[in-house]
Image: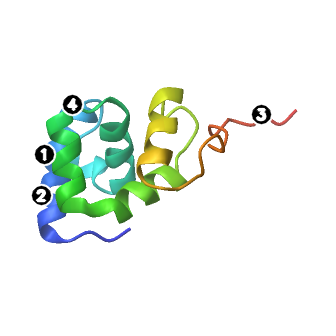
Amino acid sequence: MDVTPKVREILLSLAQKYIWWKPVDESIKIPQRIAAQVMDIGDFDDVRLLEKFAGRELLRFALTHAEAGQFSPRSWNYWHYRLGLCEIGAVPALPQRNFKR
């Protein structure tokens, strides 16, 4: 997903805090991963910053392209409702890993 220079700058600053195990230059290659991490464990100010500058499109993309383990059940449900991606009581199942035998 392409992002504007301003959004890239914000994502880089958030990556330092929320994707601490990777260099920021590597983290920014997958902006929706940074967004997902902030959506899952971010503090209120960081979530608001992300939503204000990156917009709901990136947040929806992060949620609809989430990988297994990126969201807790609580965050998964919250963001589906908050972004209007489902009806009440119809939150899709969390992504799961499939192990082939």
> Could you tell me the amino acid type at mark 2?
Glu
Distance of label 3 from label 4 (alpha carbons): 33 Å
Distance of label 1 from label 2 (alpha carbons): 6 Å
User: Label 1 crowding class (10 Å Cα cut-off): few <14, some 14-19, many 20+?
Assistant: few
Find out whether the residues at labels 2 and 4 contact each other: C-beta distance under 8 Å.
no
Residue 84 position, x and y percent, is 48, 56
Distance of label 1 from label 3 (alpha carbons): 35 Å
Residue at mark 2: 9
Numbered label attached to residue 13: 1
Residue at mark 4: 43
Distance of label 2 from label 4 (alpha carbons): 18 Å
Find out whether the residues at labels 1 and 2 contact each other: C-beta distance under 8 Å.
yes
Residue 78 position, x and y percent, is 45, 38
The extreme right residue here reads 101
Label 3: which secondary element: loop
Label 2: which secondary element: helix
* Mark 1 or mark 3, earlier in chain: 1
Residue at mark 3: 99
Q: Residue at x 44, y 44 (%)?
A: 79
> Could you tell me the amino acid type at mark 3?
Phe
Task: Say left or right for 17 vs 29.
Answer: left
